[in-house]
Image (cartoon, rainbow, N blue to C red):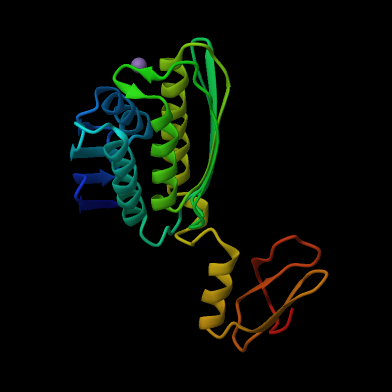
Amino acid sequence: MRSAKISRKTNETDIAVEVNLDGQGTANIQTGIGFLDHMLDQIARHGLMDIAIKAKGDLHIDMHHTAEDVGIALGQAVKEALGDKKGIRRYASCDLPMDEALSRVALDISGRPFLVWQVEFSRDKVGDMDTELFQEWFQAFAMNAGITLHVRNEYGSNNHHIAESCFKALARALRDAVEIDPKLEGRIPSTKALYRGARACGYIQSMKKNDRWRARAGRGARQILVVCGAAHPSLVPCASDVA
Ligand SMILES: [Mn+2]
C-alpha cells in the first residue's frame, strides 16, 4: 500500500497529514479554514485517496500560513507515498466542468516541480477563504510533491465553482497519474531510469545522442536502449549484442 505520514511544525503552523494513494476516498480534514476543508475533501473523494489532515495555524493573523503549509505537507506526503514511482502512469489531464465553469489540469509526476496557474477570480473571498490563497496552495503542493502542474480555468463566473473545479480536476488527474499501469510491469516510466538500470546491469556500455539515439549493448544484453530517429530512446528487445 502506498501511504505516508508527515508531521510538520513551525512557529506558524502545526500540521499532521496522512495519505493513502490506494485508498477509498475517505477524508478527515480539519484545517480551521472551512472552504479549504471543502476543497481538500474533493481531492480525497475524486482522487480516490484517503487523506487525513489536522492543522493548527496562526489564523488570528490570516489564512496565508495555514493554506500554504497544508499544501506543503500534503505535497510531501504524496511524494513520500509515491516512493520510487514504479509502474505509475505518470502523466494525466482532466477537463472538469462544474455548472458554468470549466477548469483544466494537466500534470506530470516528474520530480521537476513547476506550476503554471492561469486562474482568475472576480471576488476577494470565497466563503471564509481569500481567493489569492488558491494559487499559494497549488504552488506549495506542486513544489513539494515534485509535480509539473498546469492549472487553467477556461471560463466560469461563480468563484466557488471556479475554485472547486480546479481542485476536482487536480483530484481526477492525480488519480489517473498515480495509478499503476499494468503494461509497465513495475518499471519507472522514464527513459533516464531505464538507461541507468540497463547500465547498472552491464547491458549498455555507452550511449550517444547525435541526430538520433544510439547505444552499444554489453555482453548478455536482452534489451537495449535505442531507437533510430526517435525523439527519445526506449528499451527494445535485442537479439545481438550490438544495436
Ligand atoms: Mn462546493
Residue pictured at 41% horizontal, 19% vertical: 124
Q: Could you tell me residue 230's position as x and y percent?
A: 76, 61
**Where 159 falls versus 25 (above or below)?**
above
Quadrant in the rendering for residue 59:
top left
Quadrant in the rendering for residue 79:
bottom left
| Ligand 1 quadrant assignment | top left
Q: Could you tell me residue 13's position as x and y percent?
A: 20, 44
Q: Quadrant of the C terminus?
A: bottom right
In this rendering, position of residue 55 left or right of residue 221: left
Q: Could you tell me residue 42's position as x and y percent?
A: 34, 27
Q: Can residue 110 be seen in this view?
A: yes
Figure label count:
0
Q: Which of 57 and 102 is in front in this view?
A: 57
Q: Is residue 21 visible?
A: no
Q: Could you tell me residue 77's position as x and y percent?
A: 30, 50
Extreme residue toward the bottom, this view: 219
**Where 16 falls versus 220 (above or below)?**
above
